[in-house]
Image (spheres, coloured by chain):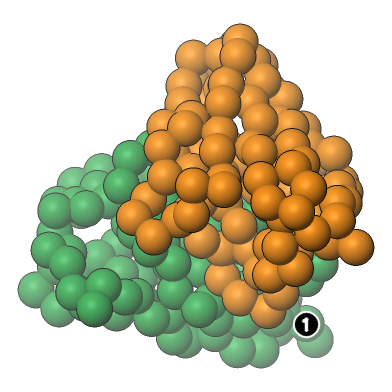
Amino acid sequence: QSVLTQSPSASGTPGQRITISCSGSSSNIGSNTVNWYQQLPGTAPKLLIYDNNQRPSGVPDRFSGSKSGTSASLAISWLRSEDEGDYYCAAWDDSLKGPVFGGGTKLTVL
Amino acid sequence: EVQVLESGGGLVQPGGSLRLSCAASGFPFSSYAMNWVRQAPGKGLQWVSAISGSGGATFLPDSVKGRFTISRDNSKNTLFLQMSSLRAEDTAVYYCAKGSEPAAFDIWGPGTMVTVSS
């Protein structure tokens, strides 16, 4: 059972905009920044968004993040087939004194 | 090129021990906290340990505390994870990850597989 809650699946068609949500509590998302990771099939995770809405160098601006209260969202615009994979949210948890992850959302591009 | 590369995974019996290594290059290793994150087959990500840049502070979740030890050799740009009293539920791909800030891991290795089975 993951500390952060994500819907297990999401889907969209090429060119569409989709959002993936992540729900936490006051000890994690409510008091710390949220990061998002992309894991394409058979590969290691990659940092996609940090500090709620910042993109590392090389990440397309089709990817954006936001946070409100104890929830966060990742939006992917102009969906492409190569975006298919798993997406994880993460945040520091003050009670557990460590990083916690969501269970992941599997994105399918139809 | 900034990269990290894990090694040392393999098959080990329940109750056994294993030491993972992570060789880093392309960045000032001693300036950054380093982490181990694991992923059981078909499952999500789980953070299993962190160590400060100097090596003076270590952090582990209760699920592995007392069984796993994280350390680093800054003279050799290498991170280690010593695992003992291994259980079937420790079976996973173990990733080495460079920490840029809490819960933000900006460089990941390809991972090394650990299988705990008799």
Give the percent coordinates (x, y) of residue A24: 68, 23
- Up the image or down, A2 lies above or below B100; here it is above
Q: Please state the chain letter of the residue tagged with numbered disc 1 in the rendered image.
A: B
Give the percent coordinates (x, y) of residue A28: 56, 22
- Up the image or down, A50 lies above or below A26; here it is below
Count how many numbered circles sit on residues in the image: 1
The residue lying toward the viewer, choosing from A56 and A13, is: A13
Q: Residue furthest front?
A: A15
Chain letter tied to green: B
Chain A shade in the render: orange
**Residue B88 in view (yes/no):** no
- Quarter placement of the C terminus of chain B: bottom right
Give the percent coordinates (x, y) of residue A67: 57, 21
- Quarter placement of the N terminus of chain B: bottom left
Direction from residue A40 to residue A2 in the image, left or right: right
Identity of the residue drawn at 57% across and 48% down:
A62
Identity of the residue drawn at 48% across and 54% down:
A60
Q: Name the kind of residue labelled 1 in the image.
A: Ser
Mark 1 surroundings: few (<14), some (14-19) or many (≥20) residues within 10 A: some
Helix, strand or loop for disc 1: loop
Give the percent coordinates (x, y) of residue B113: 62, 81
Quadrant of res A100: top right
**Residue B11 in view (yes/no):** yes
- Up the image or down, B68 lies above or below A10; here it is below
Identity of the residue drawn at 30% across and 62% down:
B71
Identity of the residue drawn at 66% across and 30% down:
A73
Direction from residue B6 to residue B1 in the image, left or right: left
The residue lying toward the viewer, choosing from B101 and B90, is: B101
The residue lying toward the viewer, choosing from B81 and B118, is: B81
Residue named by callout 1: B117
